[in-house]
Every structure is written in C-alpha cells, then in structure tokens.
Amino acid sequence: MKKKKSRKWLKISLIVIGVIILGIGTYAFSIYNDAKQTVNKKVYEPVETIDRDVVQKKVEEKKPLNILLLGVDARGNDRGRSDALMVLSLDPSSDSAQLVSIPRDTRTEIVGKGAMDKINHAYAFGGPEMSIATVENMLDIELDYFVRVNMEGLAETVDVLGGITINNEIAFSDFGLGNVNLDGTETLEYVRMRKQDPRGDFGRTERQRKVIQGIIDKGANLGSVGKISELMDVLGNNMATNMNFEDMKNLMFNYKDTRQNFATYQLQGTGTTIDGIYYMAVTDEEISKVHKMLVKSAS
C-alpha cells in the first residue's frame, strides 16, 4: 500500500515537472517568436550599399566583420544627423573587438553629393546608404552591417538593462570620478554633454564609446528572460539594421567571444575653419592608421 502510494506521488511529481518544463518551453518559444517577429518586421532595413550574400558567407566562415554604428538624434519628423558615428570591428580569430569613433565634424567627401562636408551630414542627406558609402570611401574599408539607434531609444535600452556602469574620467554636473552607475536619463546627459568638457567633441565621443561598451557588457550578461521581450519592444521602436533575426543569431554564436579583448580608439584631427564653418581636418597618415586597425585581421 505504501509502495503504491509512493508511486502515485512520483507520478504526480513527474506530471508537475512536465507541466513546468512545458510552460517554460512555451514561454521561451513565445519570447523567441516575438523577438523574431520584431526584428524581421520592425527592425530589419536592407540597404543596397552592402552585398548581403558576401556578408553571410563571411559570417559562416567566421571572418572579421565591420559594423557601422549610428547614434541619431532625430526628433519629430526630422531625420536628424548622426551625432554618434562609430565602426565596430569584430575578429573571432583573436577573440578581439576594436571600436573606432569618428567625430561628427570630420571633414570628408560625402559620397553621392560630390562635395566635402561634415561626415555627420551624410545621414541627413541620404540616410544609412549615404553614411555607409561615405565611411567606406573615407577609411577604404568594407562595412558588413549597420545599426542605427535613436538617442532617445538609448535611454530606454539602458533602463531595461537595469542601468550600466562606466568608468568616468572627468567630473561634471552630478557625475563623479571612477565607476559611475547610470540610468537611461543620466546616460543621455552623459553622452550629450560637450561644453563642460575641455576636450569638446573629442571628450564626448570618448564617453559615447564607454556607454556602448557598457551596454554590450550588460547585455551580454542579461540574466532575466523577461527583460528580453521588453528590450525587443524598445529596440523595435528605436533601432534599424540590415541584420535580420537569423543574422543576429549567427553573430551572437560565432562572434560572442570577441568582446573578451575590447579596444577603443578615436580618429584624431585638427580643428579648422573654412568659410566660417568649423571642421575637423584629418591627415592621410591618420586615415591610413585607422584603416590598418580595421582591416589588419582580414589581410
């Protein structure tokens, strides 16, 4: 009788465990399916400038990749300019990543306009297509993906992640020195400030790189499955990329260890005024230096 009773409880326990596993599996599938729908229907934005077939082959063979990151301060119906512009290079062969920021006032040829102008104007003139072509032309590199994030969406992303931690090197407003925890609103204030930084735009782009790295680090360690759904909602409203859901999965599995050795750099130049307009002039030597940083692994 006792043996029969214990078997009954074992059966009930197995049923309960089975229901729990089924529930978790259904929830996980729901999250997965929602994420897939969000990316493919709301986030995915193909561009003619990048050959998708070539990029997919590079990902399958785990070749180095270059990703253009555009932080756009668009408000209302205004397309906005790319106030943050960076190239993220991922090299799985050495498990390393290089993040190079390009100051928005950098003077270069705007491809498609045939004129010299500030690089952040490329986005205002022709969106991601013109930004991609202009950066590729300036640095003589191939870009494989682009990611555009509205700066307002940056704040929401940080809040969903539960805040980020950065190492602050200049005290201003309420931001002290050393490790600082930032919520979304504080993150926007941190990346937008220029006047209190003696390095001006150079200091601001350095802070932008710190924030990007902070988001990557926090996102890679996202512990709550529930946050993934919330994060996808935020990204769906504030992000665009030529990666579809399968591309993102392949990138996550094949390139996830590249953040182990994360280096940052900022394109250097000299301030100059032409026809009453301020630009940052960059030498051919500096362009060559950055070019080698981004293509060294592919050669």
Image (cartoon, rainbow, N blue to C red):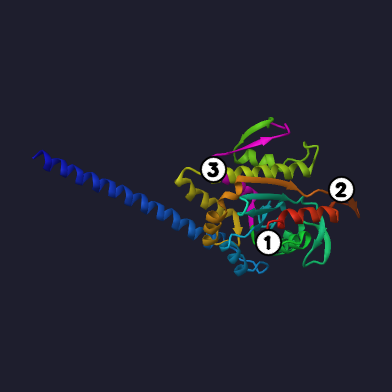
Identify the amino acid type marked 1. Leu
Find residue 50 and report its image quarter.
Answer: bottom right
Question: Which quadrant does the N terminus fall into?
Answer: top left
Q: Is residue 212 magenta?
A: no
Nearer to us: label 3 or label 1: 1
- Measured as percent of width and height from the top left, residue 135 is found at 74, 59
> Which labelled disc corresponds to residue 143?
1
Looking at the image, tell me whether mark 3 or mark 1 is earlier in sequence order: 1
Residue located farthest toward the right when viewing the structure as drawn: 275
Sort mark 1 into few (<14), some (14-19) or many (20+) by Cα contacts within 10 Å.
many
Say whether marks 2 and 3 touch (CB < 8 Å).
no
Q: Is residue 168 magenta?
A: yes
> Which labelled disc corresponds to residue 132?
none
Label count reads 3
- Measured as percent of width and height from the top left, residue 76 is found at 66, 54
Q: Give the residue number, with chain letter if any, for mark 3.
A: 161
- Measured as percent of width and height from the top left, residue 29 is found at 40, 55
Q: Residue at x 45, y 46 (%)?
A: 226
Secondary structure of residue under mark 1: loop
Question: Which quadrant does the C terminus fall into?
Answer: bottom right
Q: In the figure, 236 relative to 261: above or below?
A: below
- Measured as percent of width and height from the top left, residue 11 is found at 20, 46
> Which labelled disc corresponds to residue 271?
2
Q: Is residue 155 visible?
A: no
Find residue 143 and report its image quarter.
Answer: bottom right
| Range of magenta residues | 147-174
Cα distance between the residues tagged 3 and 1: 28 Å
Sort mark 3 into few (<14), some (14-19) or many (20+) by Cα contacts within 10 Å.
many
Residue sitting nearer the eye, 57 or 279 = 57
Identify the amino acid type marked 3. Leu
